[in-house]
Image (tube, coloured by chain):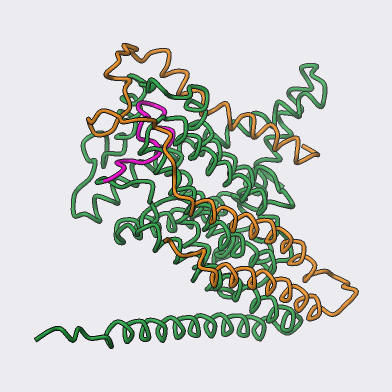
Amino acid sequence: MNFWTDPIKVIYDWLMITLTGWGMSGWLADVLINLLGIIVLITAAMVLDILLVWVERKVVARFQDRLGPNRVGPFGLFQPFPDIIKLIIKEDITPAGADKVVFNLAPILSLASVIFLWAVIPLAANVYGVDLNVALLYLVAAGAIGTLSIIMAGWASNNKYALLGAYRMVAVMISYEIPMIVALLIPTLLAGTMSMKGITLAQQDGLWFVVLSPLGMLLFLVAAIAELGRAPFDLSEGESEIVSGFHIEYSGMKFGLFYAGELLHAFTFGAFVGILFFGGWNWPLPWGDKYPLIGIFNVLAKGMFFYWVIMWVKYTVPRLRIDHMLAFNWKFLTPLAFALLIVTAVVHAIFKDLPLWAYGLAMFLSNILLGWAVLEILRSNARQERAAEETPAPAAQH
Amino acid sequence: MQNPWVYLGLFLLVGIIIPIVPIAFSALIAPRKPNPIKQSTYECGIETVGESWVQFKAQYYVFALVFLIFDVETVFLFPWALALNAQNPAVLPAFIAIEGVIFILILVAGLVYTWRKGLLEWA
């Protein structure tokens, strides 16, 4: 064991010896070292967040055939720093009728709910905050705090637009939580554990879950985009009706926290797709699990890739109407999620003791078959609807 | 740290404090010159009419209720997903799977009922 295979343990031991050498009691030193680790982890996430602002602006510029920030620093890399300075020195306006406590608490909770998620992300085989045995439930719970912060912001702003935006957003977020929970059940079912580290280890020994359940991966990605409130699911916004929705009354750093929270949330869910379905710290080459630097690189690279996919969707697909969106969830995604869960459970129970290739093939084919059947049902439904619209041809036309 | 929940408690504490830092810093150095126009409710420049906390569509309430039912029931599925992979199960795994499938079908029956009642329509 050396620094390159288990850096956290090496640093921990060194700090422990140093602190107890100064005469500090063992448990206090333990708490202090863990506190330091937490602060380093969260700070790393916030630095990543600053980088994400640049990535987001650069990528949207490329999608829209522009250059994006390119003046401050190399490739405009330092652009976020002037942005932050501007946000900090801006006057913070609180509307007259606002509920001040809730109004100030909402942006804090919005960013905090995302930071909470970083406690359970396994960055490498032995670099992680905490290996909870109920990590997936914790993920859902922390997501609920994000929903809460939105309704708090909308309610406390004392603004009709903010309130309407918050209601729409929350209706979408809670609706899409159902397919997301079911999509989270699939890795649980395949790995036999709810711990993120356990799920990654199960993929290290067997196949990546994207092979076993490609449909589950797509389901999770769609539900995650809706949970994030990014286009085409960013209903809380609407330039021509409710302007920017629930954070319409926020200015300065409070708006900045909502923005930072949204970007980090998108990246975090990208990393979750990578961890739950694409093998986390593993890659096709060896050493992904042995050297934490490679593991961290893999997790962040997968996170960045899916962050890019989420952006790709955001800047390609137009915004949907709320009734379409809720219908899409309750009449399509939720039944599909339950059908997928049933198929996965039955196939898994029957084939799990067979050799890996047979098990993998059965899972993959059952997913493809289900996907094809669903598309076929949709197609025949659409055909019927089109026929129903065409048959009562306007007889009054001459 | 031995107990993961103590670690998580510390993490949540730090996670709440870190977003407060930029807001507090901004409150220290940002100018503060409020006036009634600036603090008025933003409605694209039009004067606000009546209460800001308006009535909202009752349909949201229905969706919240349906969500609540599903959310509570899906939590029961997590232990089932774990039991399916138990090392030495008392019964055949296929039996456990079928039991779960029956539970899911009851859930789906609830969804079909709501659907047929027309509660999922945005009237």
Q: Is residue A387 magenta?
A: no
- Residue A257 lies in the magenta-colored region: yes
Closest to the observer: A336 or A262? A336
Chain painted in orange in the figure: B
Q: Position of residue A5 (x, y in %)?
A: 65, 49
**Which residue is depicted at the point 50% across and 85% down?**
A373
Say which quadrant the N terminus of chain B sits in: top right
Which residue is found at the position 60% from the left and 49% from the top?
A121
Is A18 positioned to the left or the right of A144 in the image? right
Residue A389 visible to the viewer: yes
Rendered location of residue B2, percent (x, y) = 80, 39
Q: Quadrant of residue B44?
A: top left
Relative to residue A182, is residue A16 depicted above or below? above
Q: Nearer the viewer, residue B23 or A321?
A: A321
- Residue projecting furthest to the left: A398
Q: Would residue A208 be visible to someone looking at this image?
A: no
Residue located at (36% from left, 41% from top): A245
Give the magenta part as a residue range: A241-259
Residue B12 placement (x, y as % from top left): 64, 34
- Is residue B51 found left or right of A330 in the rendered image? left
Q: Quadrant of residue A142?
A: top right
Count of marks, rendered view: 0
Relative to residue A285, is residue A260 drawn left or right? left
The chain that appears green in the image is A
